[in-house]
């Protein structure tokens, strides 16, 4: 009888038989460690057991990072376990970002301004309570240990004398017109003109301000030089940004002069400020 030819298996079947006897990889978690075991054959076709031990660390992260870790993966990484998979994810070096606003609000420029103001003369920064070279801000004596011999009160640069409604001789009751009373202009003046002249005399104009300047910034800038009656920051009606100049009406002319001497040529928000006396407005009749 003819002998049947033996059926020879292909090389693919032989490879499949070889790989079938390898145990599947497994992972064990115990005592804060992750133990991953994997089996494979080396170049000599010998079975090799590979054991990798990972230490599990718990880190405190921000809420945004913790929220991103709960996102579901997609694409070819849809079935991946938590964490980066080297087959589908490329992890590069960490890149630290520094966010810079339009005003570049950093501590260093603020410190430079404070240092420059503190190095000015006592006429520029002067406490109204004890007369020391610091800001008032509810003194008392600004934690320096300095106790003045005579407690002082906040200086009043200009005082308006009370208008007497009666003549010195109480026996003779005589009506005195407002235009002829003490402290009044004998030639007569319009309503509010006296106060307006006082404001214009102690008014200054600050120019070359940045577009991001606000009223609070301007107030902090002029606060060390004394009290002021009003402050006006020119803004564009459509954009609301600063138009580059502002007017400050101080209560005293000396405070206005100190502000001009200190702020003219002063660096503020990467610009050089200009300060000068405000020109009084001319009223046509």
Image (cartoon, rainbow, N blue to C red):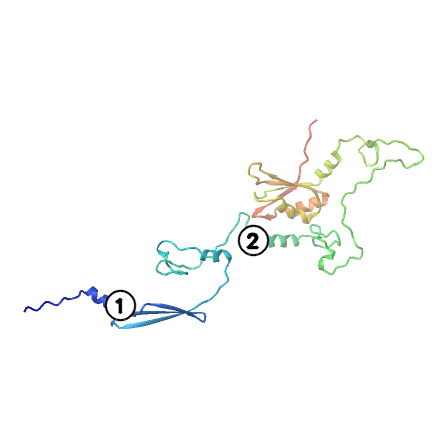
Which marked residue is nearer to the observer: mark 2 or mark 1?
1
Considering every residue shown, the one lying at the far left of the view is 1
Disc 2 target residue: 106
Q: Is residue 13 above or below residue 235?
A: below
Instruction: Give the quarter of the figure containing the C terminus.
Output: top right
Relative horizontal placement of residue 237, taking residue 83 as reference (left or right): right
Badge 1 marks a residue whose secondary structure is helix
Question: Residue 95's x, y, as percent?
Answer: 45, 57
Relative horizontal placement of residue 254, taking residue 40 as reference (left or right): right
Badge 2 marks a residue whose secondary structure is loop
Q: Which residue is nearer to you in this view: 264 or 68?
A: 68
Q: Find residue 176 and report its image quarter.
A: top right
Q: Is residue 116 above or below residue 2?
A: above
- The residue shown at (74%, 56%) is 140
Q: Is residue 140 above or below residue 51?
A: above
Question: Residue 269's x, y, as percent?
Answer: 57, 48
Relative horizontal placement of residue 132, taking residue 72 as reference (left or right): right
- The residue shown at (74%, 37%) is 195
Q: Find residue 90 and report its image quarter.
A: bottom left
Q: Which residue is nearer to you in this view: 9 or 185?
A: 9
Question: Residue 142's x, y, as percent?
Answer: 71, 57
| First of labels 2, 1 by sequence position | 1
Disc 1 target residue: 20
Question: Residue 253's x, y, as percent?
Answer: 72, 43
User: Residues under labels 2 and 1: Cα distance?
Assistant: 65 Å
Q: Which residue is nearer to you in this view: 146 or 41?
A: 41
Q: Find residue 260 and report its image quarter.
A: top right
């Amino acid at each position: 009888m003819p002998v049947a030819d033996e059926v020879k298996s292909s090389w693919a079947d032989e490879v499949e038989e070889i790989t079938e006897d390898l145990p599947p990889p497994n992972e064990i978690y115990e005592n804060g460690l992750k133990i991953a075991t994997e089996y494979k054959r080396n170049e000599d076709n010998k079975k090799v057991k590979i054991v990798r031990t990972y230490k599990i660390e718990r880190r405190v992260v921000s809420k945004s990072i913790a929220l991103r870790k709960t996102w579901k993966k997609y694409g070819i990484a849809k079935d991946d376990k938590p964490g980066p998979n080297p087959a589908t994810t490329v992890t590069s070096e960490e890149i630290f970002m520094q966010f810079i606003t339009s005003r570049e609000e950093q501590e260093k420029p603020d410190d430079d301004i404070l240092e420059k103001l503190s190095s000015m003369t006592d006429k520029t920064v002067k406490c109204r309570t004890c007369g020391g070279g610091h800001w008032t801000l509810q003194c008392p004596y600004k934690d320096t240990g300095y106790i003045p011999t005579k407690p002082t009160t906040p200086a009043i640069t200009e005082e308006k004398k009370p208008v007497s409604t009666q003549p010195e001789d109480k026996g003779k009751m005589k009506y005195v017109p407002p235009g002829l009373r003490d402290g009044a202009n004998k030639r007569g003046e319009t309503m509010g003109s006296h106060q307006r002249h006082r404001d214009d005399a102690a008014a200054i104009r600050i120019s070359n301000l940045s577009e991001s300047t606000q009223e609070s910034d301007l107030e902090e800038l002029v606060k060390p030089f004394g009290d002021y009656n009003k402050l006006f920051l020119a803004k564009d009606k459509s954009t609301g940004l600063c138009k580059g100049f502002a007017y400050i009406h101080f209560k005293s002319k000396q405070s206005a002069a100190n502000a001009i001497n200190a702020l003219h040529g002063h660096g503020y928000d990467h610009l050089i400020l200009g300060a000068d006396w405000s020109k009084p407005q001319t009223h046509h009749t």
